[in-house]
Amino acid sequence: MWRRSLTTSAGTTTALKQKTKWDAIVVGGGHNGLISAAYLARAGLSVAVLERRHLVGGAAVTEELIPGFKFSRCSYLLSLLRPQIIRELELKRHGLKLLKPMASSFTPSLDGRYMLLGQSDEQDRLEISKFSKRDADAYFRYEAQLQKFSKFLDFVLDSPTPEILQGSASTVDWLRHKLQRSKFWAQCMGHTISLGQKGTVDLMELLLSPTSKVLDKWFESTLLKATLAGDAIIGSMMNINTPGSGYVLLHHVMGETDGDRNIWSSFICRHVEGGMGAVSLAICKAAKEAGVHIETDTEVLKVMVEDSGRANGVLLADGTELHSSVVLSNATPYKTFMELVPPDFLPVEFLRAIKYSDYSSQGTTKINVAVDKLPQFHCCKINRAEAGPQHTATIHIGFESMEEIISACQDACNGIPSHRPVMEMTIPSSMDNTISPPGKHVISLFTQYTPYKPSNGSWDNAAYRESYAERCFNLIEEYAPGFCSSVIGYDMLTPPDLEREIGLTANVCRRKYFPWCYGYGFTFLNATCQRLVKS
């Protein structure tokens, strides 16, 4: 089982305590923390990773909660994990195997029509032409523009953050720091110039505009606009009429794996054999091979800080003190700076910014379902026991119009779960026979919107939780008759569950931090890693 393969033996705790001092300690064994640890160890540093749960991976885990069915409990697709990380850590040698679907996006409609995208450019044109010939032409221009913008943001993602040098520094360090910052901004300016004046204006419009405005400008088909709008709201409490939601639209089309990149690249070649835990397992193997010491069931209580303000280790929940030259945190910013780091050592303005960051956008409930047969969508008019292209695609349930998305979001803003949730549905077992018994399947439902504290009930109430799950299943039933009767069992993670079990801050008004297991967090840890390696 994954639980065994991702944990260390109980006897290693003694070895952890016996070491006098580590070069680096990483708090949290999520995929970003493991990646950072692997790079540091490859540079010759002694590194320990401390994970609170019984297995590493954070939100990228595979767990067998129903006998025979292995669920990717949180993140469910791989896309934004940077290609150079996969290459440099040799993750494929360590067992990472990507699975390419027959199609990338499937949006069924209750009127009997559907839109199936991602099989080929020619097929995409035919599919969109069923709804609008004008949109079929505009679609490829839209795709080309997003690809151009994605290349610009790739540079930002792959660059160390241009942070301000803190504390006293030697002349050499100061000059090196100024040179690095100047190089970053010079390259940034070069990429901006390459976009041209119109391209820069178009990029700024996309970054600042509501998704609805962007899509209305490009397309006329209701179903196509709703399908594309799904990318702008996934994992958030954001309305598609919210200014700035256009950035999230771009954010989710920046994926690239094995050279595949297009508007649906965040869904292409992104299922992983063995579930998302296989990603963490491959990174874990690479880290261990480099010499990283990994401990599970090891909770960090506090980051220890010297009088000078420099972190020098961590205090574990069992009272053990572990010393290190530097501490990296894979926890959320709120958890790190409001709970782990003593407040006396942080600027008041910084603490206030962290405290009042907005995490309220965490409006997602993840439901993992075990079923005894594939769902059959009545719009396809084909009933087969084997998987078709639509089963391997990302299936958009409830995305028939942008008005439906707006209505679902408004329910949550009023304090109640959406009456008709919008859902991304994937069936990884349609491509991967290692995660379910023969003939049976695993279904992942990424559902929205669900407030952290509903005004009409509580997520701690079993009946309330069940009513929401049934609401989601009944909605799928409208598109795929027989779905409800096929359900064997399910696992459900509401916003409070994600915070409590996985450590994803979601309570009160703070900023969303929902790692999709795509590697963005590594961008922020990367600068620290590079400074450590060079020092």
Image (cartoon, helix red, strand yellow):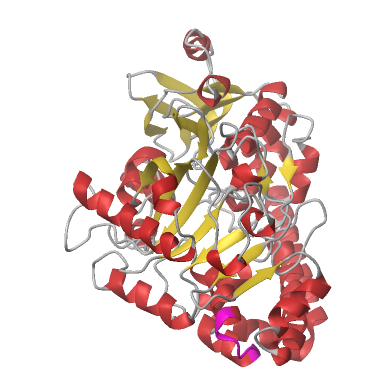
Among the 4 quarters of the image, the one containing residue 383: bottom right
Q: Is residue 183 left or right of residue 398?
A: right
Which residue is at a point 50% across and 49% down the rendered structure image?
Answer: 444
Q: Is residue 33 visible?
A: yes
Among the 4 quarters of the image, the one containing residue 451: bottom left
Q: In x, y percent, where is residue 485?
A: 40, 48
Name the one closer to the observer, 28 or 234: 234
Answer above or below: position of 43 versus 239.
Answer: above
Q: Is residue 192 visible?
A: no
Look at the image and say whether residue 401 sits in the magenta stretch. Answer: no
Which residue is at a point 60% across and 79% down the rendered structure image?
Answer: 224
Q: Is residue 435 left or right of residue 128?
A: left
Name the one closer to the observer, 459 or 382: 382
Q: Is residue 171 left or right of residue 226?
A: right
Which residue is at a point 75% across and 67% down the rendered structure image?
Answer: 262
Name the one closer to the observer, 64 or 218: 64
Answer above or below: position of 532 versus 524.
Answer: above
- Count of all numbered marks drawn on residues in the image: 0
Answer above or below: position of 99 versus 290.
Answer: below
Instruction: Please state the extent of the stretch shown in magenta in the rendering.
Output: 218-223
Q: In x, y percent, where is residue 69?
A: 51, 33
Which residue is at a point 37% across and 62% down the rendered structure image?
Answer: 357
